[in-house]
Amino acid sequence: MAMLCFNLLAKEHLFGWRNSTETDIHHARNLIERAQRLNPNSDSVRVSHASFLLFMMHDHDAARIEAEHALFLNENYYSAYWILALIECTGGNIEKGIPLALHAADSNPSDPLIYRSLRGAGVAYAVMGQYETAADWFLRAARAAPALPQTLLGLAACRQLSGDNAAARTLEIQNPAGLPLGMKAPADGVAGA
């Protein structure tokens, strides 16, 4: 319940579908707190709360406490490592966030949401200016979950920034149904071509 509420609210907010109202945020907080009262030892509720605190309240310290509590409850919970990586990276501690993202990616490679950790590592390396390494991580994320626009944009941007203009320009993507959605920029419309 808490995870669903937060995820719906966060997706609307993060993807710009609509602005979250104070009523929405208050309702989400109440549902997460209720879930914590019902099951105070739930690692997934703790991670949902950490995500809420990070993305909706912008409270890195409180989010870190919740994520660390989730790891105390389950030291192998990859989502807790993933949210800790986001907390560190968005707080400016990219060097500390990358190993957490990589640990999350390595700890549960069969999870369908693994692309988040792989893409997170790509973003972190891109912010550090290591575009070739970032492109490798974005490519791994794209293989784990094909056709996600944020991943493909990161991959194309890192290829462009690392000087591989042809790869960035001719990036071919597939949608989940396997239909080609060729994205090719005209040679004269790409900066630096």
Image (cartoon, grey):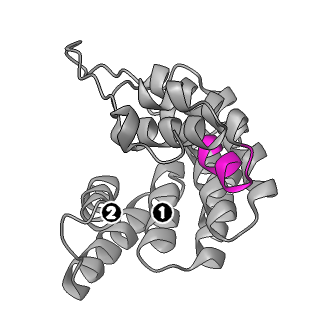
On residue 134, the disc is none
Part of the protein shown in magenta: 121-130
* Residue 119 relative to residue 125: left or right: left
Relative depth, front residue between 76 and 182: 182
Residues 78 and 16: in front is 16
**x and y, in percent, of residue 26 in the image:** 28, 82
Rendered location of residue 94, percent (x, y): 74, 58
Quadrant of the frame with the N terminus:
bottom left
Dot placed on the residue nearer the N-terminal end, 1 or 2? 2
Q: Residues within 10 Å of mark 1 (few under 14, many from 20)?
A: many
Element marked by disc 1: helix
Q: Which residue is mark 1?
A: 51
Q: Position of residue 95 (x, y in %)?
A: 81, 55
Looking at the image, can residue 73 be seen?
no
Q: Is residue 53 left or right of residue 164?
A: left
Which SS does the magenta portion mostly show? helix
Tell whether 100 sits left or right of 52. Answer: right
The relative height of residue 174 versus residue 188 in the rendered view (above or below) is above
In this rendered view, identify the residue nearer to me: 168 or 10. 168
Give the residue type at disc 1: Ser
For the view shown, which residue lies furthest in the right direction? 95
Asked whether disc 1 touches disc 2, contact meaning CB atoms under 8 Å apart, the reply is yes
Q: Which residue is mark 2?
A: 10
For this rendering, which residue is in front, 138 or 62?
Answer: 138
As drawn, 19 above or below 85: below
Q: Check residue 34 for magenta coloring.
A: no
Q: Quadrant of residue 109?
A: top right
